[in-house]
Amino acid sequence: MGSTTHFADRALAAVEVKRSHVVVGLDPDYAALPPELRAKHEALEYEDEQRQVVAACREFLFTLLAQLVEQAVAVKPQLAYFEAMGPRATSCTWT
C-alpha cells in the first residue's frame, strides 16, 4: 500500500536522515552488464531470450540498489530502457 505522505516530503526527510542528495537512475542495458553476469545467465535455461535479459538486468539492478540503500534518497527508473526490453521488463520496476 502506498504512503499518504507527499513524495517531496519523503524525499526531503531522506535527504536529512541520510545526509545525501544521491538519486539513482536505472538505465538497464544488457550489453553493458558485467561479462560475468551475462555469461552466468546465458548458461541458464530460460523460455526465451527476453526472460534471460530481464533476469540478468534484474539481478544487476537489485544488487546495485542493495549496495546504495544507505546513500540513495530516491530511485528513478528510466522506463524507456525497461520498455525496450519488452513487457516482462517493466515488471522489474514495480517489485
Image (spheres, rainbow, N blue to C red):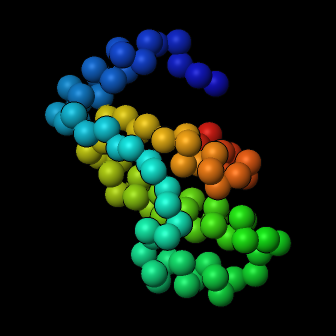
Residue at (44% x, 12% y) in the render: 6
Q: Please provide percent x and percent y for residue 5.
A: 46, 13
Q: Give me the residue at 59% from left, 22% from top.
A: 2
Q: Is residue 88 left or right of residue 31?
A: right
Whether 13 is drawn above or below 71: the answer is above
Q: Residue at x 41, y 52 (%)?
A: 65
Front position in the image: 84 or 14? 84
Instruction: Determine whether, in the image, residue 83 is placed left or right of residue 5.
Output: right
Numbered-mark total: 0
Residue sticking out furthest to the right = 47
Quarter placement of the C terminus: top right
Image location (x, y in percent) of residue 93: 58, 43
**Residue 23's spot in the image, x, y percent?**
31, 38
Q: Quadrant of residue 48?
A: bottom right
| Quadrant where the N terminus is found in the figure | top right
- Say which quarter of the image contains residue 8: top left
Position above or below: 14 against 49: above
In this rendering, does residue 59 appear at all?
no
